[in-house]
Image (tube, rainbow, N blue to C red):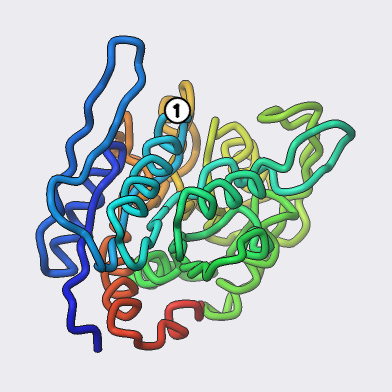
Amino acid sequence: MSSTEAKIFACSQSMELAQKIANEYGQPLGRVEIQRFADGEFRPSFKESIRGRRVFIIGSTFSPTDNLMEMLLMIDAAKRASAMHINAVIPYFGWARQDRKDEPRVPIAAKLVASILETAGATRVVTMDLHADPIQGFFEIPVDHLYSSAMFIPHIESLNLDNLVIASPDMGGAKRAYAYAKYLKTDVAICYKQRLKANEVSFMELIGNVEGKNVIFVDDLIDTGRTLVKAANLMLERGAKSVRAAITHPILSGNAVELIENSPLEELIVTDSIPLKTLSNKIKVLTCAPLFADVMHNIHSHRSISKKFIM
């Protein structure tokens, strides 16, 4: 057990979630002040001593890029203030969709972000449902990769749906769908899709039988919502009784919320890794605060967190 109390700080974009995590952890958020300049530049500063302490800095790195920059500046400030352990708690790890060189002359942004987090001074990263599991290997520091199934599975079980099928809206999510299906003892359906360009699906086909079934899609993120809505329509065309979705990170760009509201989806279940810009009766938010607070306690007291990685 560590004899020195850890300190928890929030980036401004994740203040609400950080407050929930701090409440679950059992201590108040540390004091941070952000000075903003006329040209948009900003400077965070810690308003209490963190010398020799373990600090947890909570902030999802969704758009705009200022959110990533704020995390980096806070890590750098903590390093220069002589914090002993600097844990970047990033519920949503942005830029993760660029995880490989899939065409000529493009960057691997996820690797770049990993490198700059380390350069800034992070000694550990705690995150949830990365877009691709191998991103953990981009780091030379420990990465704790948590799963939203800890929140989603109890909710799915509470629905008491018969003839349940777990589905993935694309081939890339097949592993996740099979993991849920194995735990829930259900069948699996997969949507095969082709894209003309980013966020635009040109073709989609179904692998599996959904006739008379209650379908629940599982995925790591929802951006424009077009793929999910197209997949939901396909499921109903193939005889599904109902369609829901459990998706970890609600990016919900543009008119995504309106698209979801006008879709045949009965419910979209998300976490609060990213704050919702627009509320909707169709969107149910489950908090990930207890999961992160529990893991942070275990990290600080040097206890195992291996059970948190099991679906």
In the rendered view, does 210 fall on the left or right side of 288? Answer: right
Q: Say which residue appears at 78% left-offset and 48% top-offset.
A: 192
Q: Categorize mark 1 by other alpha carbons within 10 Å: few (<14), some (14-19), many (20+).
A: few
Compared with 83, 69 (above or below) is above
Report helix, strand or loop for mark 1. Answer: loop
Q: Looking at the picture, how far across and down is residue 109, in whole percent?
A: 66, 41
Q: Is residue 211 visible?
A: no
For the point 78% across and 57% down, the residue is 207
Q: Which residue is mark 1?
A: 64
Query: Residue lying furthest top in this view?
Result: 38
**Residue 299 falls in which quadrant of the image?**
bottom left
Q: Which of the 4 image quarters holds residue 258?
A: top left
Q: Position of residue 212 (x, y in %)?
A: 59, 60
Q: Quadrant of residue 155?
A: bottom left
Q: Is residue 304 left or right of residue 104?
A: left
- The amino acid type, in three-letter code, at marker 1 is Pro
Left or right of 234, for residue 251: left
In percent of the image, x 33 and y 67: which residue is there?
Answer: 84
List x then y, in percent, for residue 183.
Answer: 53, 80
The answer to which of 155 and 132 lies nearer the viewer is 132
Between 145 and 182, the residue placed more toward the observer is: 145
